[in-house]
């Protein structure tokens, strides 16, 4: 583990997790390979995807992102050098968390990723129709079989997360080591509070998604500007709020002090929060990567963190 890497169960991960949702969607395979190459060249080792990416695109059926990443791993021969995270439960052919679904979904993911193991396997959405005993036993089976190294949860309530951790401890099964919450400077209540408390009490690492609030926290969305983007509608909603505008002002101030991009500051704020190991951010082009990777070199001062905390409260 290098000085900047964080522990994630038995894994060691870089301070920026590269989101793979754009691969096979807004970035074709050639562009995706270029982004992945540049991310690894910049010191990154942690790549996040899901079996459902990107089933929402007309003509796609899910698994496109995993396929691109699998092709890249095969082409580069670097499987042992990267931490691959993917998710189960939302693919159109593998919905929910029944034991049978998990066991068929993991094999489909392994085939697309062209590997025999997944480093970090998330339950993508909690499935409250299934007892925690069923899906955790199924996940433990995958760990014992060597198909999965560590397990994690995303989109789960504090109560179900606590129940899951208690069951694993009681039965001696694989336990969640990480949590992927929706969390950023303009969406703090989606994690802070009860969910973050459960994570902290149990030593879970948080890997926040929507770390840049659909691009809003890059600063490219300003009053009177129009941005052509697949995500511009959501970013515009943040701009319409007083909190959103206050956060941009605070980010401008801190970024200027460090001669840094706003995105870097927003990610550094996340990285400084209790339990957070590595925020997730995606890059459609290599030009978008330097501001993301720079998070490993930016440490915010206590007054800067206070300024951002107060603007985002």
Image (tube, rainbow, N blue to C red):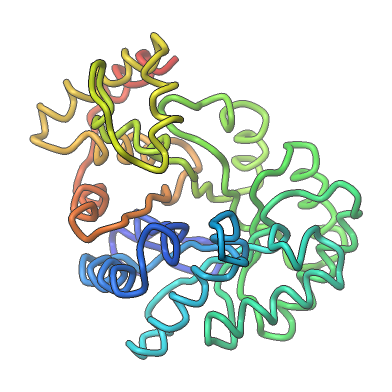
The quarter of the image holding the N terminus is: bottom left
| Residue 173 placement: quadrant | bottom right
User: Observer-nearest residue: 144 or 29?
Assistant: 29
Seen from the viewer's position, the closer of residues 51 and 4 is 51
Q: Write down the quadrant of residue 92 in the picture.
A: bottom right
Q: What residue do we see at 46% from left, 41% from top?
A: 210
Is 296 located above or below residue 66 in the figure?
above
Residue 107: image location, x then y, percent: 69, 82
Q: 248 left or right of 193?
A: left
Above or below — where is 69 with respect to 195?
below
Q: Residue furthest top?
A: 242
Numbered label tally = 0
Q: Is residue 29 left or right of residue 153?
A: left
Q: In the picture provided, is 182 more to the left or to the right than 106?
A: left
Report x, y in % for residue 56: 58, 54
- Residue at figure coordinates x 91%, y 54% from the top left: 131
Residue in the picture at 62% in, 42% down: 199
Residue 273, by quadrant, is top left
Where's the C terminus, which quadrant? top left
Residue 263: x %, y % from top left: 26, 38
Q: Is residue 227 shown above or below 276?
A: above
Residue visible at 62% across and 76% down in the picture: 109
Q: Position of residue 26 (x, y in %)?
A: 38, 57
């Amino acid at each position: 583990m290098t000085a900047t890497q964080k522990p994630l169960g038995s894994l060691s991960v870089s301070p920026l997790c590269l989101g793979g949702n754009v691969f096979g969607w807004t970035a074709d395979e050639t562009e995706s390979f270029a982004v992945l190459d540049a991310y690894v060249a910049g010191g990154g080792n942690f790549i996040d995807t899901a079996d459902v990416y990107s089933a929402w695109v007309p003509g796609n059926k899910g698994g496109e992102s995993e396929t691109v990443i699998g092709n890249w791993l095969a082409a580069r021969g670097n499987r042992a050098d990267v931490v691959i995270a993917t998710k189960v439960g939302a693919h159109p052919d593998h919905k929910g968390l029944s034991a049978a679904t998990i066991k068929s979904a993991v094999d489909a993911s392994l085939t697309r990723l062209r590997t025999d193991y997944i480093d970090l396997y998330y339950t993508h959405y909690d499935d409250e129709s299934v007892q925690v005993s069923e899906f955790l036993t199924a996940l433990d089976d995958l760990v014992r079989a060597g198909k999965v190294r560590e397990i994690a949860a995303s989109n789960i309530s504090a109560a179900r997360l606590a129940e899951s951790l208690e069951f694993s401890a009681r039965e001696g099964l694989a336990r969640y080591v990480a949590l992927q919450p929706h969390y950023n400077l303009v969406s703090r209540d989606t994690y802070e509070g009860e969910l973050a408390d459960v994570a902290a009490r149990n030593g879970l690492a948080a890997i926040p998604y929507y770390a840049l609030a659909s691009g809003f926290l890059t600063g490219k969305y300003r009053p009177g500007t129009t941005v052509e983007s697949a995500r511009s509608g959501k970013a515009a909603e943040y701009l319409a709020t007083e909190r959103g505008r206050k956060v941009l002002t605070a980010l401008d101030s801190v970024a200027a002090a460090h001669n840094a991009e706003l995105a870097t500051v927003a990610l550094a704020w996340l990285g400084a929060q209790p339990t957070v190991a590595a925020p997730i951010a995606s890059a459609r082009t290599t030009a978008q990567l330097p501001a993301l990777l720079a998070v490993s070199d930016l440490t915010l001062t206590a007054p800067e963190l206070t300024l951002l905390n107060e603007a985002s409260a």
